[in-house]
Amino acid sequence: MERRVFLGLAAAGLLAGCGGFRESRINPRNWFGRSRSRRRETAAAESDTNPLIPEEEEGGFFDNLRRRGKDIPYTGTPVAEISALAVERTTGGAIVRVRGIAAQQDIYDVRLTPDAEPVDGVLGYELRAVHPPLSTATATRPREVQAAVFVSDKTLENVRQIRVRALRNERVSRR
């Protein structure tokens, strides 16, 4: 009887001592904290040209047939603002989820385009979308977009922060 009481008290004391694990750096749920918004140092300059119209030379009649087999490059432009960034741990890596607000409605093909490679522990992305011509801005709700990308554990090995840029701001989540 004394043995059971002793083991029960020892187990209760051990369990009570583990309460600090929730806030520790060992807990994988704390690896990336809440994101914070900050202003971009170099905001994209506005010009008189329409960035949605690609600058191409006029080609011949059969140019489209030759280009059909090749990958057409992504022509998305940066979304106006990022409203939320979340990094969720998963098996084998993490999912980076981003919510943004576009300058106009009816945008499509929203993507998180990565920077080249992580530099100094910073993994960078840019939230881009394809904008249709001649659409007007309305309330915030129809202009809200979301995108996500999976990042493997191998890529996250040397990463200390994840940065996602937009036209007006960027959000950073640190480990």
Image: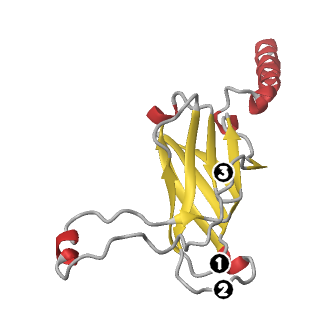
Look at discs 3 and 1 and give the one toward the viewer.
Answer: 1
Which of disc 1 and disc 3 is earlier in sequence?
A: 3
Q: Which residue is mark 3?
A: 86
| Disc 3 and disc 1 in contact, CB within 8 angstroms | no
Q: In this rendering, would 118 be left or right of 70? A: right
> Mark 3 falls on what kind of element?
strand
Mark before the other along the chain sequence, 1 or 2: 1
* Rendered residue at 53%/27% (across/down): 158
- Look at the image and tell me in which quarter the C terminus lies: top right
User: Residue shown at 58%/30% (left/top)?
Assistant: 121
Residue position for label 1? 104
Question: Splitting the image into 4 quarters, where does residue 169 fall?
Answer: bottom right
x%, y% of residue 90? 53, 44
Label disc, if present, on residue 136 of the rendered structure: 2
Q: Are marks 1 and 2 in contact (CB under 8 Å)?
A: yes
Residue 41 vertical placement versus 108 (above, below) = above
Picture layout, residue 101 above or below residue 123: below
Q: Is residue 80 left or right of residue 150?
A: right
